[in-house]
Image: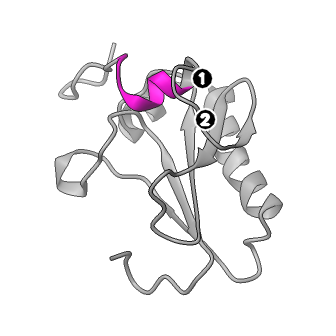
């Protein structure tokens, strides 16, 4: 059950379909709890999406319902990917959108990793 006030999880969203293997992705990392892949419409030279394999609509939903292993797995994976892609020296940005005011496009909790150029205060 989703967090009160949030919409129910939509099993037909694009990330659910990627997780089921219905839509291909350029995989960066996968383990029991997380899938990470390159965004098909990158907003920076490096633009990786990190998604939990569970059906979570938002960070609030994820932080309330996910297991300790899922939560740790997601955040450790973000660190693993930034090191694997050599992003630590020059820096990167993490972003997680929630809801229409943030322009969340897929209602499946996910973290964006942006890098590869000076990002400024915000992305265009």
Q: Which mark is residue 71?
A: 2
The residue depicted at 25 percent of the width and 56 percent of the height is 102
Q: Quadrant of residue 21?
A: top right
Q: Position of residue 79 (x, y in %)?
A: 73, 56
Q: Nearer the viewer, residue 24 or 79?
A: 24
Which residue is identified by label 1?
67
Q: Secondary structure at mark 2?
A: helix
Count of number-bearing discs: 2
Q: Does the magenta stretch mainly form a helix, a strand or a loop?
A: helix
Query: Residue lying farthest top?
Result: 1
Q: Which residues are magenta?
A: 11-18
Q: Is residue 65 visible?
A: no
Q: Position of residue 27 (x, y in %)?
A: 69, 41
Q: Residues within 10 Å of mark 2 (few under 14, many from 20)?
A: some
Q: Which mark is residue 47?
A: none
Q: Is residue 11 above or below residue 58?
A: above
Q: Position of residue 53 (x, y in %)?
A: 57, 25
Q: Is residue 7 above or below residue 116?
A: above
């Amino acid at each position: 059950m989703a967090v009160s006030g949030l919409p129910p999880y939509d099993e037909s969203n694009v990330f659910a379909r990627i997780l089921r293997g219905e839509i291909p992705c350029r995989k960066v990392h996968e383990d029991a709890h997380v899938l990470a892949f390159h965004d098909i419409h990158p907003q920076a030279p490096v633009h990786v999406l990190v998604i939990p394999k569970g059906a979570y609509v938002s960070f609030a939903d994820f932080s309330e319902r996910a297991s300790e292993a899922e939560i740790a797995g997601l955040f450790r994976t973000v660190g693993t990917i930034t090191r694997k892609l050599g992003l630590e020296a020059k820096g990167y940005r993490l972003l997680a959108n929630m809801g229409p005011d943030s322009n969340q496009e897929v209602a499946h909790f996910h973290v964006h990793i942006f890098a590869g150029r000076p990002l400024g205060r915000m992305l265009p």
